[in-house]
Image: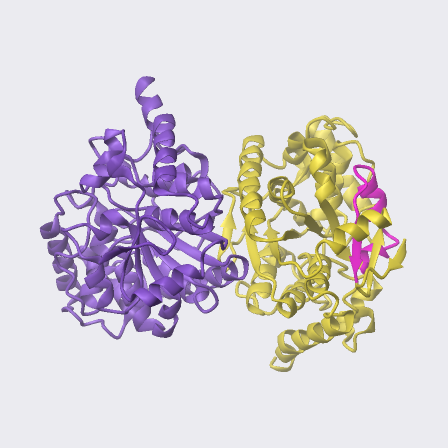
Chain colours: A purple, B yellow
Amino acid sequence: MDKHNLGLKSVSIIGDEVKASQFIENLKGKNPVFICTIANTRTAMVPGITVAGAIPEIVKCTPPADAELVYYGECKCIPGIPATPDGKPTPAIITLSALRLADIPFFIVEAGCEVKPHAPYISLSIPSPGDNIQSGRALDRDVVGKAINYAELIGRDFAELADYLVLGESIPAGTTTALGVLMSLGIDARGKVSSSMPNNPHEIKNKVVENGMKAAGIKIGSLKDDPIGAISTLGDPMMVSVVGMTLGAAKKVPVILAGGTQMAAIVALISRIRPSILRNVAVGTTNYIIEDSTSSISWLINQSANIPIFGADPGLSESKKEGLRAYGSGFVREGVGAGGATLAAMLKSKGKITTDIIRAEIERNYEKIVESRLKNR
Amino acid sequence: MDKHNLGLKSVSIIGDEVKASQFIENLKGKNPVFICTIANTRTAMVPGITVAGAIPEIVKCTPPADAELVYYGECKCIPGIPATPDGKPTPAIITLSALRLADIPFFIVEAGCEVKPHAPYISLSIPSPGDNIQSGRALDRDVVGKAINYAELIGRDFAELADYLVLGESIPAGTTTALGVLMSLGIDARGKVSSSMPNNPHEIKNKVVENGMKAAGIKIGSLKDDPIGAISTLGDPMMVSVVGMTLGAAKKVPVILAGGTQMAAIVALISRIRPSILRNVAVGTTNYIIEDSTSSISWLINQSANIPIFGADPGLSESKKEGLRAYGSGFVREGVGAGGATLAAMLKSKGKITTDIIRAEIERNYEKIVESRLKNR
């Protein structure tokens, strides 16, 4: 992994440099749409599996709260904003800042939330969150099939309107379901998925997936020819949405999968549904994921496809705010498409929006949203 | 009213010719998005008020069925397609044909339906259909206020992506609620709103509105300074969506209100909320509405604003199919944004998609969707 300039400062790339340069050059100055899929999996209720939200009961509100924060600059369904128990703010604050700076339109896809967002959203008619994958039955297979078709229509329609799509997600415990899907597809991802905590709880995740595989009566690779089965058994409803939209859009325009190791599951699924469209797909994440020694996004993606992985730097390790600097020490790292949004802002502005500008905007929003609230207590 | 060429055959205009020419010239070759709002009002249950659907119990499925027809070329929530009791097909068949010919992306906004569409849709979180306006309480005022804000966000976001918006609707009995809103705003629209039947049941509509006004304790013009109150009292949830999206989008890009006399209520509402944005708004309808002697769209619109009205001709009075020819004799006339979609297809193709081409495509779809079904009975 090297830092490459590509005319954009602070974007690392992994993968074939020529291919990656071409991909990114084509998008400079173009108009993207950012679509964030929000969903829940009851896997998040397993103790110790996620800190995406300060209080367990509030974890279920994290996805709609993230979406509201990006839309309005404040949350509606919870007081304050999603944060780790010790106050590190949700990556939605990065997404908000990047999208506003670059004037990138934002849409929400609701793909099975415990609580609906107080904002307009696109519905895929997924009736409920994903079940705890320890049951080995995450989602009804018919629901998955139908909703993937709906998401494909949405992707197709946005591909008529935007030059490219940036697809983010907010689903607590999403790296555990990613692990489950990767395992069932034959990719031994144990110890390689990332976490919102510096001490990545790999043992808990492995145990949950092991339980789910046992309950479903499958072994590693049992579902390698059945991607829909893999989602239904050990996946989550976010995958349904992002896989479907990518299938619908990437026929026509490039798609940036905006997320960390969860996107490895998306790439693995697509590689088993319609691999040819992956030539129009890249992963855009934060440099915090690229540099994470507790996970390995490049290894995970490379098991399925040779596509570019971009790591954009929102500059938080240099922040004057302690809560933001924590991103540089392994807290939170990614989510709500923060890395992809940062990349898209840099691309749309042809590099005029730099890491320094994005960090300043994030700090400004942090003062407005987080610090002002603490003062008013 | 004259036929003007404007480089597009078969588009009539009403209003200031210079202004109208400018409006339309700016849109030639540009990329629109077509957004159809679907909703119900229980006013449609009044006997004799609408024929938008063959059987009264099926009228409530007409909006989702229309949306499905445009998406898929077939309906999912009902067998066959919406039609008048004697088999005249829904105008969604025009919309479908025009949008497909010109490759115009299509989105559904669900704004309070009895039955949700079997397709992806944008939700405004309107919890239920509008009530029968004879109660004088069509919608909860807080719901209206919140959903208008949501729709405004949607309009703003699509305005970032598309060169202009075309906003259609499907809501049975929508001309009656339009009458109600116009009356409450001080526009005496009695005898001037259109109908899906050649014998426009003006007396029923007038009586329903009269009952609603009595129940609400208001007179003509009582709500002239309270547009939100007018929607809540005698309106319907489609208005919430279309008014909101127009407010959000027309700041930045042109908006074509794709519908008949229902759009007069939209224009009246906007003229009382934010009149300045109407300079970026026009009405696009079918020539069947323009030529309708039982209603008067131009008089209705002119009470609120001097904006262009375009009447596009899908050519059905020349059709070889009897069920389609009926459009030329006062049946159905408009709906599901048929006229606006026809206009947009002509504009996007710079006139290459002519009335003859659209009629041929409608006939092809009619054979495929309607006649093949009759044969298979």
Is B289 one of the magenta-colored residues? yes
Quadrant position of residue A225: bottom left
Quadrant position of residue A117: top left
Start-end of magenta stretch: B287-312
What residue lies at 57% left-to-right and 61% top-to-bottom?
B105
* Quadrant, the C terminus of chain B: bottom right
What residue lies at 35% left-to-right and 22% top-to-bottom?
A372
- Tag count in the figure? 0
What residue lies at 32% left-to-right and 42% top-to-bottom?
A314
Quadrant position of residue B346: bottom right
Q: Is residue B205 above or below residue A251?
A: above
Choose between B269 and B114: the one closer to the eye: B269
Choose between B137 and A68: the one closer to the eye: A68
Choose between A77 and A353: the one closer to the eye: A353
Question: How far across and how far down the image is residue B47, in percent?
Answer: 71, 50
Left of A54 or right of it: where is A159?
right
